[in-house]
Structure formats: C-alpha cells, structure tokens
Amino acid sequence: MIRQEAELRALLTSGLSGSAADYRRFLERLGPHLRAYFKGKLARSGRGAAEAEDLVQESLMAVHTRRHTYDAAQPVTPWIYAIARYKLIDHLRRTRAGLADLPIEDASELGARDDHAATESTLDVERLLAHLPGKMRQAVRAMKLEGLSAAEAAERSGMSESAVKVSVHRGLKAMAGFVGGRKG
C-alpha cells in the first residue's frame, strides 16, 4: 500500500502541475482501488457490481472536480477514500437502503452530520447545471442526482436511452470543464 500511495501521490501532484498524461494515469490507477472498495462495501449489504461501477464513475468525477482541494503535503489515499465514502453514503441514502441492510460498523455513517458542506455542494451543482442545455440538464439531474436508471430517465424525458446516456456523459464533461475554468 505504501508503494501505491507514493505512486498515486506522485501522479496526482504531477497532474496538478500540468501533466495531462500523469493525471490520466492517476485516474486509471485509481479506478481498480475504488472498484475493490465499493465491491467490498456493497457485497456486505447484498448489492451488486453494477452499483459499484456506478460509484466508481461518480467518485472519479468527484475526485476530478475536487482535485483543487487536495493538499500535496498530505497523503492522497485518505483524501480519495473520504470522497468515496461520501459517495457510498449518498448512494445508500438515494437508493433508500435501510439500516437493517448494512453491517453494523457502517450504520453510524448514515447518522446525523453537518450538512453545511452538502448544502454548499448542492448550490454549486445547481449553478453548474444551469449552464447546460435543457435536455442535457434534465438527463444529468435525473440520473446523477435523482438516481434514476437510463431507462427511467428516457421515459421521463421522451428521449432514447442512448440519447440520455450521451447527454449525461457530455453534461458531466461540460460541468467538469466549467469547474476547470473552461466553457465546455
């Protein structure tokens, strides 16, 4: 784990300094770690690999959009796993997982917490969504904020499943560009 920490940290700091290739390698190396983390957590509550994969993608997006918050003087893995943990908690809440479905050691994570940061994040997301065209905004909101499947979002919007998936992908990419200071 120490070698992995050093490698991830070096790739991220190089990426933050401008190396797109190292940043891409950082995200590629990070994927398997997140996948194992989510599969382990979700398997304990009887959930599947598809949910884990969704959480991996959401976490990679969150790491990307929050990369400016990483303190290079600190280890990278606790920062990453804190993001992943919050994505897992949000997912379990969104999918209405009851405390009975979770192992006892994870139950405390669903309890009360200070929602000030969550409120600020929600406002930030709403500001970013406002920059997207209507159908794209609707698709991102339905799938990523409301937790609908592509089929459910397609039925709601009158779009095809493929169009919804493309809209979500392009919308998230555009939002990441907005955060990074680009216009899309």
Image: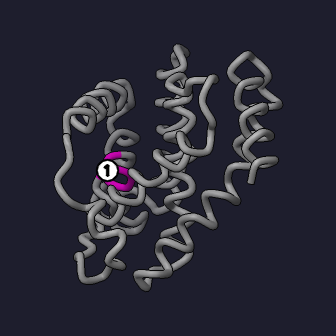
The type of residue carrying mark 1 is: Leu
Horizontal side of 79 relative to 124 (left or right) equals right
- Mark 1 nearby-residue class (10 Å; few <14, some 14–19, many ≥20): some
Q: Quadrant of the N terminus?
A: bottom right
Question: Which residue corresponds to mark 1?
Answer: 145
Q: Is residue 25 visible?
A: no
Q: Nearer the viewer, residue 83 or 78?
A: 78
Q: Nearer the viewer, residue 155 or 10?
A: 10
The residue depicted at 37 percent of the width and 31 percent of the height is 133
Horizontal side of 65 relative to 133 (left or right) equals right
Q: Is residue 165 above or below residue 149?
A: above
Q: Nearer the viewer, residue 20 or 85?
A: 85
Q: Nearer the viewer, residue 80 or 104?
A: 104
Image coordinates of residue 144 in percent, x first then y, are: 38, 51
Tell me where residue 127 sits by quadrant: top left
Image coordinates of residue 145 in percent, x first then y, are: 31, 50
Horizontal side of 5 relative to 110 (left or right) equals right
Q: Which residues are magenta?
A: 141-145
Tell me where residue 98 sits by quadrant: bottom left
Image coordinates of residue 39 in percent, x first then y, are: 56, 72
Magenta region includes residue 132: no
Image coordinates of residue 37 in percent, x first then y, are: 57, 64
Magenta region includes residue 144: yes
Q: Quadrant of the C terminus?
A: top right
Main secondary structure found in the magenta portion:
helix
Q: Is residue 20 visible?
A: yes
The residue depicted at 35 percent of the width and 39 percent of the height is 137
